[in-house]
Image: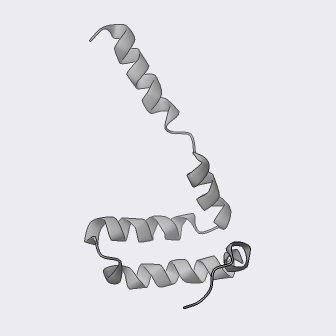
Amino acid sequence: MSNDKKAGATAKVDDDDEPDDWDKRIYSTGCADENAKLTDCYYEKKDWRACKEEMEVFRQCWKSHGNDKRTGTKDA
């Protein structure tokens, strides 16, 4: 691989450090940390049922920041 191609590949990786639209939306909810913990739990266990505690923490954060009204979510 030439040095030019290596430099181009590195530049693409560096650009990925900027928050994308998804990240900006999650940060705006006020529950980014809770979302990350929930996502990490699912990634490790591959079963949402094993992440009930993380889901409840996220749900409470979501409600406390008024996101349920903003997004129109409903309790089941």
Specify whether 50 is left or right of 64.
left
Q: Residue 55, how many percent across, how many down?
A: 46, 80
Specify whether 7 is left or right of 65.
left
Seen at 50% across and 68% down, the residue is 35
Quadrant in the picture for the N terminus: top left
Is 63 above or below relative to 18? Answer: below
Is 66 above or below relative to 35? Answer: below
When asked about the image quadrant of residue 26, the answer is bottom right
Specify whether 19 is left or right of 6.
right
Seen at 51% across and 71% down, the residue is 34
Colour scheme of the rendered structure:
one colour
Is 38 above or below relative to 1? Answer: below
Q: Residue 15, how many percent across, how many down?
A: 51, 32
Quadrant in the picture for the C terminus: bottom right
Depth check: give the residue in front, 57 or 9: 9
Q: Residue 67, how many percent across, how many down?
A: 68, 74
Depth check: give the residue in front, 71 or 26: 71
When asked about the image quadrant of residue 53, the answer is bottom left
Depth check: give the residue in front, 24 or 72: 72
Seen at 56% across and 64% down, the residue is 32
Specify whether 44 is left or right of 26.
left
How many numbered tags mark residues here? 0
Seen at 62% across and 77% down, the residue is 62
